[in-house]
Image (spheres, rainbow, N blue to C red):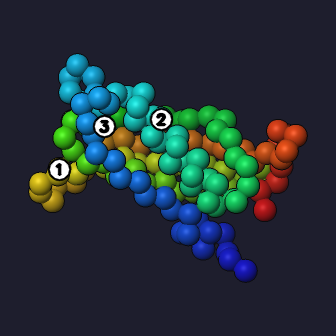
Amino acid sequence: MLTTEDKIQNSITRVFKAVFPNTTNHYDTLFGGTAMQYMDEVAFITATRFSRQKMVTVSSDKIDFKKPIPHGTIIELIGKVTYLGTTSLKVRVDIFIEQMYDDSREKAITGEFTFVAIGDDKRAVKIV
């Protein structure tokens, strides 16, 4: 039987994306809304991998945009469960910028997303 910590470690989710011009604004940086969409998707995958139950986003908390993400870079999104309640859990998602042709890497965005497990009737159920 896996411990909660084992489940947290096993559910850490990493997704890489290249930032192309079709996802950038007039400043040639990633649209904030696109970054949030990517983050919610990674958070959903993380929550589902942790619980193996139907999960829905119920809130996003304090998304900090620390650095602009320029086109022509690679981003890594990392999702990790940070809190476990009875029917809900929280996932922190960090986005890191990597230059394509050198080893530089820096954190650009951090945010936290809350999910609730639901049953077939769309009502909250206990996370098992």
Q: Using the numbered discs, state the Cα–Cα distance from disc 2 to disc 1 in whole angstroms.
A: 22 Å
Of callouts 2 and 3, the N-terminal one: 2
Of callouts 1 and 3, the N-terminal one: 3
Which residue position is annotated with label 3? 66
Name the residue type under label 1: Gln
Viewer-side label of 1, 3: 1
**Quick one: SS at disc 2?**
helix
Which residue position is annotated with label 2? 37
**Quick one: SS at disc 3?**
loop
Question: In the image, which disc is placed on residue 55?
Answer: none
Horizontally, is 111 left or right of 109 in the view?
Answer: right
Q: Where residue 54 appears, x then y in whole percent?
A: 73, 49
Of callouts 2 and 1, the N-terminal one: 2
Q: Where residue 127 appears, x then y in whole percent?
A: 77, 56
Count residues near mark 3 (Cα–Cα under 10 Å), then give few for <14, some for 14-19, many for 20+.
Answer: few
Report the residue at 54% width, 36% height from top. 61
Horizontally, is 57 left or right of 95 in the view?
Answer: right
Name the residue type under label 2: Gln
The C terminus: image quadrant: bottom right
Name the residue type under label 3: Lys
